[in-house]
Amino acid sequence: MSDEIDVVWISSSPVLQRFDQPLLQYIAKYVNVAQWEYRYGKDEAGSIDEAVTLLDEFLSQCSHPVNLAGHGAGGAIALSYARRYPEKVRSLTLLAVGYKPANTWHAYYYLQRQLFTISREQVLATNVRHLFGEQPTHTTKKLIAVLNKDLEQTPLLHSLFQLVDLPTGGVSMPMMVCGSKNDSIVNSPALHNWVHYFKPEDNLWECPQGYHFFHYFYPQQVGEKILNFWQIYYPQPMDANTLFYSSFIN
């Protein structure tokens, strides 16, 4: 890893990376960004602990603390890493991560499967509306396929039989938490409960709309808020025009 990298974006699922790109391309105009993705083979077990271990192997190549950021389950990995290795993290930025960080859309999906006697595809179609808003039929079908794949790739071990949990609480470094006012997965109460763990330097911001993937629909607005938060560490915007993609495949 180049020592020039300032921000590491954590991706938990290769199939969802496409929704991160507009935001990453925007912030890459000002800071050097590396994208780290967690993958595991079909015959291997995925978990948050394994993801944190692999992320540490990746970040051990960097000589200075970095700013970590991530959305959803990727944010849960970043949060877990920041708690385990606080000396290696300059700041933490979480998008669509509630104060109960394991309560991702995957948990919401399995809860619906437990409560309602409808098909997997019907539940996924409902989740598409909650995550992206109303979409045309052909787009909904494509997004159902994406979510179906993400269920296989997430490191969170939710299932029809058990919903996992992660510890609540804050972190020692400065933290920014972002969400959307019309996100029904990580809703405003789940977001605002973070303030119980906030330090004076921490920050919470809600996008007026955009559902769960608000950073995809409003990359500039979200990017400006995050860059303002990072200005604490950068007296002047950095003149960087390249987005560095780095991935770790287990």
Image: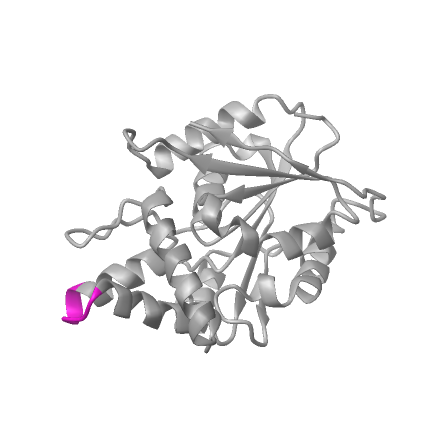
Residue 17 place in picture, x, y as percent: 53, 49
The number of callouts visible is 0
Q: Residue at x 35, y 42 (%)?
A: 155
Q: Is residue 204 above or below residue 87?
A: below
- Give the side of residue 110 with respect to residue 234, left or right: left
Residue 195 place in picture, x, y as percent: 49, 63
Residue 115 lies in the magenta-colored region: yes
Residue 100 lies in the magenta-colored region: no
Q: Is residue 157 above or below residue 99?
A: above
Residue 53, visible in the rendered structure: yes
Residue 114 place in picture, x, y as percent: 16, 64
| Magenta span dominant secondary structure | loop
- Give the side of residue 181 with respect to residue 219, left or right: left
Q: In this view, does 84 lie above or below 57?
A: below
Q: Is the N terminus in the top left, top right, bottom left or bottom right quadrant?
A: top right
Q: Which residue lies furthest to the front in this view?
A: 138
Residue 127 place in picture, x, y as percent: 36, 68
Q: Give the range drawn in magenta.
A: 114-119
In the rendered image, which quarter is residue 13 located in? top left
Q: Is the C terminus in the top left, top right, bottom left or bottom right quadrant?
A: top left
